[in-house]
Amino acid sequence: MKGSVWWLAHWLGVASVALLVACSDEDNTGATDSGATPYEKLQALEGCGAPVPCGQMLTYAADESVGACILGSLSTAELAQHRVMGSITGDERFLWDLFVATDRSVQVVYRAIYNEPDANWDDPDDYDYTLSNCALRPATYFDDCLATSPIAAGCLDPNAWTEACSPLSEVHCP
């Protein structure tokens, strides 16, 4: 009888672990499968819990203190999430979400939407997404930007913060 109880308890334990692994959408790095939508990938990255040390930066009305905070964080490759929102004429919206790892790698989720008759700015599926895996520019780039006052507009362009970008199909926690 004791052997039967042990065997049943052991089998239930193994079955429970197998069920938990089989039902998980993520591996131990927080990676999502490449079949997820871009919005689901953004949500997965946001779920990683990376610190958000600076506020959202607006490219069309940049707050120098927020810009300096982001540039300083990028200079030291601080584990962080940064969000930048831009618009040229007010008829479109551009958003950059940068997920920075301490090894200077960055997962960038860029999305754009234009004020078209059928566009819904509140619907994440109406945005055009580009997901990239990039490297931060050298620390000296950010330090040079921080050394100027006021900070040069080119330094506050999120497209200038990264290099060596390639398409990103799977995301993982930084």
Image (cartoon, rainbow, N blue to C red):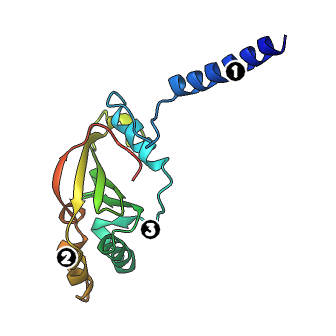
Taking the spot 36% from the left edge, 34% from the top edge, the residue there is 125
Disc 1 and disc 3 in contact, CB within 8 angstroms: no
Total labels: the figure holds 3
Instruction: Mark 2 vs mark 3: give the one in front.
Output: 2
Taking the spot 30% from the left edge, 51% from the top edge, the residue there is 107
Q: Is residue 56 visible?
A: yes
Residue 47's disc number: none
Q: Nearer the viewer, residue 67 or 46?
A: 46
Q: Which residue is mark 1?
A: 10
The residue lying furthest to the right in this view is 1
For disc 3, the neighbor class at 10 Å (few under 14, some 14 to 19, many from 20) is: some
**Where is residue 123 shown, x and y percent of the image?**
41, 37
The residue lying furthest to the left in this view is 164
- In three-dimensional space, the C-alpha distance between marks 2 and 1, rounded to whole angstroms, equals 57 Å
Amino acid under disc 3: Gly
- In three-dimensional space, the C-alpha distance between marks 2 and 3, rounded to whole angstroms, equals 21 Å
**Where is residue 89 shown, x and y percent of the image?**
23, 58
Q: Give the structural element (helix, strand or loop) at label 3.
A: loop
**Where is residue 130 shown, x and y percent of the image?**
24, 43
Q: Give the structural element (helix, strand or loop) at label 1.
A: helix
- First-in-chain label (2 vs 3): 3
User: In the picture, residue 98 is in which quadrant?
Assistant: bottom left
Amino acid under disc 2: Tyr
Amino acid under disc 1: His
On screen, residue 14 versus residue 102, left or right, reads right
Q: Which residue is mark 3?
A: 55
Q: Which residue is mark 2?
A: 141
**Where is residue 20 shown, x and y percent of the image?**
58, 27
